[in-house]
Image (cartoon, rainbow, N blue to C red):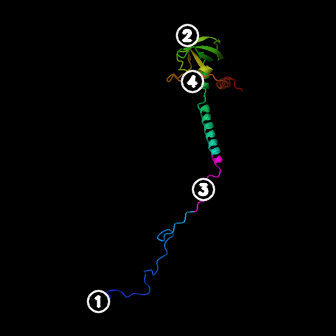
């Protein structure tokens, strides 16, 4: 067998291309690649003042929302049932932070007199607002003293309230007789 006999004959429909494609720009020809076209607005801000103003407005809005959350969170919720069960409802101030004695400033319900000094054994620790506003105390007689009226004897948590203007207005609305 001769070497030419083992090869198939060449045909006109060969799969090998006769010419190679032209090289890409910037490759083997030595030409530099064209730089990409960039839009001018994408590289420099059109209005730097607008961005500053928007960020200042966003910071102001954030601060305002934080302020509202701090001032309006944890509103005082009064217990009408506690006020109904109490024999006395007074606004008073402590003699000192460690004392169980209070001095009555104002009487909203009951027979105590303003200026009376009374002892309350179950008086809870001082509230944050107490030094500015005083306390609104629903009281019941206890031996020769008074105690903060509790709603559940099994879990005797004494509820007292800061005597702010808003709390006193709510209290007066709760104590007002309901029209029939």
Which mark is first along the chain, 3 or 2? 3
Question: Which circle's residue, 1 or 3, is located before the other in the chain?
Answer: 1
- C-alpha separation, residue under disc 2 versus residue under disc 1: 134 Å
> In the image, which is nearer the foreground, mark 4 or mark 2?
4
Where is mark 3, residue-wise? Answer: 42
Q: Secondary structure at mark 4?
A: loop
The magenta region covers 37-51
Q: CA distance from mark 4 to mark 2?
A: 29 Å
- SS at mark 2 in the image: loop
| Residue 85 in picture, x, y percent from top left | 60, 21
Which residue is denoted by mark 4 in the rendering? Answer: 128
Question: Is residue 39 found inside the magenta-colored segment of the image?
Answer: yes
Name which of mark 4 and mark 2 comes first in the sequence: 4
Q: Which residue is mark 2?
A: 144
Q: Residues within 10 Å of mark 1 (few under 14, many from 20)?
A: few
Separation (CA) of disc 1 from disc 3: 70 Å
- Among the two numbered marks 2 and 1 on one chain, the one whose residue lies closer to the N terminus: 1
């Amino acid at each position: 067998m001769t070497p030419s006999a083992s090869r198939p004959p060449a045909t006109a429909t060969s799969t090998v291309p006769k010419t190679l494609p032209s090289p890409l720009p910037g490759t083997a020809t030595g030409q530099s690649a064209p730089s990409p076209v960039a839009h001018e607005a994408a590289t420099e801000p059109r209005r730097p003042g607008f961005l500053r103003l928007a960020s200042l407005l966003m910071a102001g809005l954030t601060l305002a929302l934080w302020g509202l959350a701090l001032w309006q969170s944890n509103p005082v919720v009064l217990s009408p049932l506690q006020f109904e069960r109490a024999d006395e409802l007074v606004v008073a101030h402590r003699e000192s932070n460690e004392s169980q004695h209070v001095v009555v400033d104002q009487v909203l319900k009951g027979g105590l007199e303003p200026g009376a000094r009374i002892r309350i054994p179950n008086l809870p620790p001082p509230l944050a607002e107490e030094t500015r506003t005083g306390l609104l105390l629903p009281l019941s007689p206890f031996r020769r003293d008074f105690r903060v009226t509790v709603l559940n004897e099994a879990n005797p948590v004494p509820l007292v309230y800061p005597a702010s203007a808003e709390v006193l207005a709510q209290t007066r609305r709760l104590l007002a007789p309901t029209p029939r």
